Structures are given as structure tokens and as C-alpha cells.
Image (tube, rainbow, N blue to C red):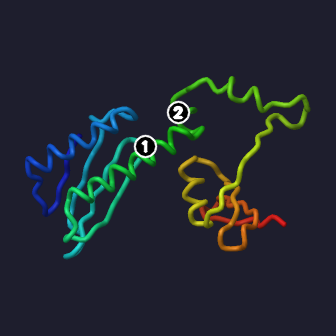
Amino acid sequence: MNFVTKDITITDAMNDFCRDKVKKLSKFIDTDTLKLTLKKEGQDQLKLELCSDIIRSTILGDVNNSFYSLFEEVTDKFERQIIKYRNSRTYARKAKLDLSKIDDEYTTESDSITKEKVVILSIISPEDAIEEMEALGHSFYAFRDSYSNDENTIVYKKTDGTYGLLHLK
């Protein structure tokens, strides 16, 4: 793991703590390629960023917070992002996994419909749905909108990079 610091010095104890915490991430990714950036943001905030080739986690915290608690937060967030990414089809395509066995159970005999899938819609906000969609690498995401009385909704990414919502009645 590479350390990059700006306006802050990392002690040996901090270095050892980071290396011990990052060991638990080694079951998911190669931890030698990780980059940890720690810098001051303004006068009263620390910015701690943990990056890999595919995932970046950033935590802003008060200077009064300890480095150790910030690092635990960022590694927990990073681990959640890795798990989301690994469970997505994007990871499977990049890792060149054989998905034919998974897709066989969803195929039908029809000429026009090539795949059928049952999806359980989660009750979340549109902002969280956008985050889920981006984490999965999809261009749309179906969910039940927590703001509009559990209305079935689809969020989609438009060609100009903005997002749209379809409310299903």
C-alpha cells in the first residue's frame, strides 16, 4: 500500500495500524496496489481517501476525530463497495467469468424475449438508487420510491449524463 500525505505526518504506529486493517481487504483485492491519501481540507477537516484500480472511497472528518476512526470508516466503506462491485455483472465481465450457467435459468423459449428475471424492488430514495445503479454499472435501476409512498420507479441515465425518473402507475 502506498501512502501519500499532504500537511500531515504519518507515524510508525499509524502505518502499522493501516497495514493491519488493510489485511482484511486482501481476500477481495491485491492490497499492494492500494493508495492511501491523507490531507488537510481547510483548517478543521481531514480527507482520507483509499483507492484501487476500480474503487475509490473518500471520507471527510473533523480534525478532532482520530485518524484511526477515520481509517476504520474508510476501510469499512471500501469493503462495502468491493462487495457491491464483485456482486455486479460488471465485475463478472471484467473478470471474464462464465455467466452462461447463471443466464440459462432465466432464458425462455420465445423468439423476442431472450431473458427473464424476477427482481425484488427495494424501498430507497432516488439518490440511493442512482448510487446503486452506478455501483452496478447499469444504465437504469428499478426501485420503490421511499419519498412517494412506495411508488414503483425506474431511474435511468440519459445520454447527456443526467438522470431521469419513470414513475410506474
Where 94 falls versus 2 (above or below)? above
Which sits in the foreground, 132 or 123?
A: 123
Number of residues whose C-alpha sits closer than 10 Å to that of mark 2, classed few (under 14), some (14–19) or many (20 or more): few
Q: In which quarter of the image is residue 65?
A: bottom left
Q: Can you say which quadrant of the picture contains the N terminus? A: top left
Residue type at numbered disc 2: Lys
Residue type at numbered disc 1: Ile
Where 11 falls versus 97 (above or below)? below
Query: Dot 2 lies on which element?
Result: helix
Q: Can you say which quadrant of the picture contains the C terminus? A: bottom right
Per the rendering, the mark at residue 94 is 2
User: Residue at point 68% right, 66% down?
Assistant: 145
Query: Dot 1 lies on which element?
Result: loop
Q: In this view, does 12 lie to the left or right of 96?
A: left
User: Residue at point 65% right, 58% down?
Assistant: 157
Asked if the residues shown at circle 2 and circle 1 are in contact, with their CB atoms under 8 angstroms apart, the answer is yes
Q: Is residue 49 left or right of residue 16?
A: right
Q: Mark 1 points at which residue?
A: 54
The x and y percentages for residue 146 are 65, 69
The x and y percentages for residue 153 are 73, 63
The x and y percentages for residue 97 are 57, 25
User: Residue at point 20% right, 59% down?
Assistant: 67
Number of residues whose C-alpha sits closer than 10 Å to that of mark 1, classed few (under 14), some (14–19) or many (20 or more): few
Where 87 falls versus 156 (above or below)? above
User: Residue at point 24% right, 66% down?
Assistant: 46
The x and y percentages for residue 49 are 30, 55
User: In the orientation shown, which residue stands out farthest toward the bottom?
Assistant: 43
Q: How far apart are marks 2 and 1 (CA)?
A: 11 Å
Per the rendering, the mark at residue 35 is none
